[in-house]
């Protein structure tokens, strides 16, 4: 083959060979670049099964275009010879680095992160490798890991979960020392099979030897089927407890007890490396959050505001009673509102006296709204009822009567005096003068709800503006939506979902309430109807609403990249919108870019947004980046901005423990206890408090503060005794402290919990 040409590729030299084919270095004479060409061996080319397998390898590689996977350029046949053209990867196979010599823990973790990242991408594309081993992994001179040889891969052949083997032989696939027990039994491989092999590769990188030392195939298969290998730390005492636990978990004999995906393995490795994990700060741990976020099972919160109250709602006293919460801020002056003259457009003469009637009815409706000071409009000296000049009005209410065929429509807009922008609009149909009082009553209630929000010094108005002003909606629907939003923003007891449902009963085409409740509906398996309805009205929606409908679709699909893109589009129509920015930061955090998430959140922190979850979101990202002092300052400042959610006290207590400040720890511990008592100690909230201690405990562990890490992990276990991951991390810390008997007890408890309580995120 040397010197011959396949297509426009000139063969230069042989660089490798295997059971399926031979790999050559070749020159692409069109693009003047080096490539690797894998040619199906003549013996294999004689069988149809082998040729089908070879073609499917090309399909697998074409699906998996990722920095840690060898890129395919072409697939073709010439004179009955099948070949795949791939990028040529300089460097050496991983097997050359691990022959009798362990890599450093740092290198093992760094390469492991890349390995898991590449596998996760392949799995997302429906490709299972099936033969992962050091010989199929190449390390470039710049330490980039590349996964090669998908010759035994399985590829989804339809939209269901069925797969086809690419070995085509019907026998065992894979390389024995790295095969999972279920592979040896002849069962169908899935993601967890690759996870096992990845664990075996990590084992070899960390120790310099394979997990099982049997000298013949029968003994080796028996050892794999029997269970776990010896802990890596027995061969290499320099291995960290965290890496030791990750390897053993990846290689668990029971697939249900392994990492359930390469994403989960990647997250734990990244956390161990000290780099931002690819999962958000979940109250049940980063690993589980990634799995749920990827599946869009309700973890994602719409506009970063509806999440807690939609999933931890309190029962209302009566479904027929709407108790509007008090939202005015103490000491804040009321809004000055001017009623502009009502206009009649294209209406009949019998409505000529309607403007004065409408003015009077509307003034009567608004007279009892405590959040505003209604201004009188005079021809000469226009002054407000509190003595201020009319010219200093904050808002103007403009009413219009528009003839639409044989009927009429009342259109109401609220105009910002300083910018002349429309902040709110609504409309309602009216057939006759007799219907005016009822119609103005609807408009008045919608305006009152808007003023209730707007009166908080623009605290909420700009956040709700794009939702309620994109298109005119029925006034009472807007009222219900705003009432639900107030409960969300103020973290006051209530049930926003009930208000959102009422809004949709009044106006089914109202986009906002459907999207605000969608995360919870997705979690409950009820989101499809809302999503289908949103898509059916997308053509009539405003550009902002269209972006948010697209976001809702990406949310349901678990497509984080698309979620970020659609949020960025929505922000073009609502620049600086705080819920959208918080949500974008959440997506960035899930994607592992905590630095970008902090940059997105910084304007909200600097602006002291009075929304409690914001500060916990900040803390989660900042702690991952090691910004401990800044986290403490930000959380302490937040206590004067908004009534804190308990985890703010939990984070501050945990940070005080890390600093060794027992007085501060005691103080924040007491404040936390009091806050929980005020809330009635709801079980979900108490259990969620384990997360701040666990996250800060991981920081303490990584910085070598093992005694303080132990205290923090113990606190996490106290708050959430049924969570095995917290016990695993406590066990690893106890081992560092030489308390091996206690560590063994904690690991046994964690194992028992996993066997007794399957992970609900696993399907």
Image (cartoon, helix red, strand yellow):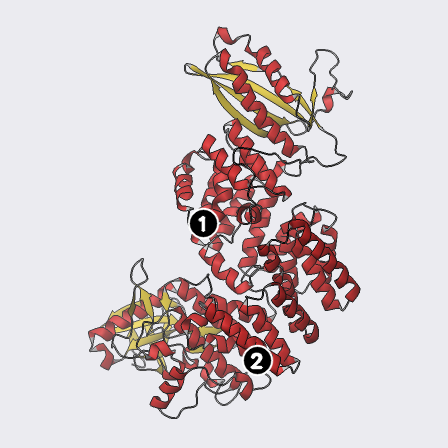
Q: Secondary structure at mark 1?
A: helix
Q: Please name whichever residue, 65 or 322, is drawn nearer the observer in this view of the structure.
A: 322
- Residue 744 bears which disc, if any? 2
Evaluate if marks 1 and 2 touch, with contact meaning CB atoms under 8 Å apart.
no
- The image shows a total of numbered marks equal to 2
Mark-to-mark CA distance, 1 and 2:
40 Å
Q: Residues within 10 Å of mark 2 (few under 14, many from 20)?
A: some
Q: Image check: 131 left or right of 433?
A: left
Question: Residue visible at 53% across and 59% down?
Answer: 591
Quadrant in which the N terminus is drawn: bottom left
Q: Please name whichever residue, 78 or 454, is drawn nearer the observer in this view of the structure.
A: 454
Question: Residue visible at 59% across and 43% down?
Answer: 488
Q: Image check: 40 left or right of 109?
A: left
Quarter of the image for residue 27 reads bottom left
Q: Secondary structure at mark 2?
A: helix
Quadrant in which the C terminus is drawn: bottom left
First in sequence: mark 1 or mark 2?
1
Q: Residues within 10 Å of mark 1 (few under 14, many from 20)?
A: many
Residue 552: horizontal and vertical position, in percent? 46, 46
695 shown above or below 684: below
Q: Is residue 543 visible?
A: no
Residue 641: horizontal and vertical position, in percent? 72, 46
Q: Which mark lies nearer to you, 1 or 2?
A: 2
Residue 637: horizontal and vertical position, in percent? 74, 52
Quarter of the image for residue 343 reads top right
Can you name the residue that lies furthest to the bottom here?
215
Which residue corresponds to mark 1? Answer: 522
Q: Image check: 735 left or right of 194?
A: right
Q: Is residue 365 visible?
A: yes
Residue 699: horizontal and vertical position, in percent? 65, 68
- Residue 134 bears which disc, if any? none
Q: Please name whichever residue, 54 or 196, is drawn nearer the observer in this view of the structure.
A: 196
């Amino acid at each position: 083959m040397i010197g011959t040409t396949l297509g426009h590729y000139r063969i230069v030299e042989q660089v490798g060979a295997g059971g399926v084919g031979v790999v050559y270095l070749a020159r692409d004479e069109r693009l003047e670049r080096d490539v690797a060409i894998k040619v199906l061996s003549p013996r294999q080319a004689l069988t149809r099964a082998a040729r089908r397998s070879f073609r499917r390898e090309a399909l697998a590689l074409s699906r998996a275009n990722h920095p840690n996977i060898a890129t395919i350029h072409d697939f073709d046949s010439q004179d009955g010879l099948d070949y795949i053209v791939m990028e040529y990867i300089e460097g050496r196979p991983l097997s050359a680095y691990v022959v009798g010599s362990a890599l450093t823990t740092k290198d093992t973790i760094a390469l492991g992160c890349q390995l898991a990242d590449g596998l996760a991408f392949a799995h997302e594309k429906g490709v299972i490798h099936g033969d992962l081993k050091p010989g199929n992994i190449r390390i470039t001179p710049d330490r980039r890991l590349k996964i090669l040889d998908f010759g035994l891969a399985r590829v989804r052949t339809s939209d269901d979960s069925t797969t086809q083997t690419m070995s085509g032989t019907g026998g065992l696939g894979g390389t024995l020392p790295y095969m999972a027990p279920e592979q040896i039994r002849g069962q169908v491989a899935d993601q967890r099979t690759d996870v096992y092999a990845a664990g075996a590769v990590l084992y070899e990188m960390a120790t310099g030897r394979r997990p099982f030392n049997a000298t013949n195939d029968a003994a080796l298969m028996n050892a794999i089927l029997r269970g776990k290998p010896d802990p890596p730390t027995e061969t290499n005492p320099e291995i960290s407890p965290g890496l030791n636990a990750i390897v053993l978990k990846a290689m668990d004999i029971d697939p249900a007890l392994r990492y359930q995906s390469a994403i989960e393995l990647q997250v734990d490795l990244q956390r161990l490396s000290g780099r931002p994990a690819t999962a958000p700060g979940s109250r049940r741990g980063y690993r589980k959050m990634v799995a749920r976020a990827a599946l869009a099972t309700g973890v994602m919160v719409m506009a970063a505001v509806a999440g807690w109250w939609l999933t931890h709602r309190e029962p209302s006293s009566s479904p027929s009673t709407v108790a509007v919460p008090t939202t005015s801020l103490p000491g804040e002056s009321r809004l000055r509102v001017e009623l502009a003259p009502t206009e009649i457009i294209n209406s009949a003469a019998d409505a000529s006296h309607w403007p004065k009637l409408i003015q009077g009815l509307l003034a009567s409706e608004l007279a009892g709204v405590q959040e505003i000071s209604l201004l009188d409009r005079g021809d000469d000296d226009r002054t407000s009822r509190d003595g201020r000049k009319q010219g200093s009005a904050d808002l103007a209410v403009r009413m219009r009567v528009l003839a639409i065929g044989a009927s009429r429509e009342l259109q109401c807009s609220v105009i910002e005096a300083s910018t002349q922008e429309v902040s709110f609009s609504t409309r309602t149909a009216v057939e006759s003068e007799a219907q005016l009082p009822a119609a103005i009553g609807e408009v008045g209630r919608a305006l009152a709800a808007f003023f209730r929000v707007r009166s908080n010094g623009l605290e909420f108005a700009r956040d709700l503006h794009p939702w309620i002003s994109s298109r005119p909606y029925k006034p009472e629907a807007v009222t219900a939506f705003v009432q639900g939003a107030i409960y969300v923003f103020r973290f006051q007891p209530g049930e926003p979902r009930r208000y959102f449902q009422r809004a949709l009963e009044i106006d089914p085409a109202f986009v906002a309430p459907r999207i605000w409740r969608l995360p919870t509906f997705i979690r409950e398996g009820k989101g499809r109807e809302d999503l289908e309805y949103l898509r059916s009205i997308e053509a009539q929606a405003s550009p902002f609403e269209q972006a948010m409908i697209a976001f809702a679709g990406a949310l349901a699909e678990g497509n984080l990249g698309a979620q970020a893109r659609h949020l960025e589009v929505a922000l073009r129509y609502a620049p600086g919108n705080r819920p959208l920015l918080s949500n974008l930061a959440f997506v960035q955090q899930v994607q592992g870019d905590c630095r970008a998430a902090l940059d997105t959140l910084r304007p909200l922190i600097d602006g002291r947004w009075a929304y409690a979850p914001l500060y916990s979101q900040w803390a989660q990202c900042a702690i991952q980046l090691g910004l401990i002092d800044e986290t403490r300052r930000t959380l302490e400042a937040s206590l004067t901005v908004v009534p804190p959610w308990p985890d703010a006290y939990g984070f501050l207590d945990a940070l005080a423990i890390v600093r060794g400040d027992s007085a501060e720890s005691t103080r924040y511990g007491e404040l936390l206890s009091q806050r929980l008592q005020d809330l009635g100690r709801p079980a979900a909230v108490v259990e969620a408090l384990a997360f701040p201690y666990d996250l800060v405990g991981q920081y303490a562990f990584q910085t070598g503060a093992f005694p303080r890490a132990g205290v923090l992990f113990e606190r996490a276990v106290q708050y959430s005794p049924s969570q095995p991951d917290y016990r695993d991390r406590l066990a690893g810390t106890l081992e560092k402290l030489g308390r091996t008997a206690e560590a063994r007890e904690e690991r046994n408890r964690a194992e028992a919990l996993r066997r007794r309580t399957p992970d609900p995120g696993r399907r």
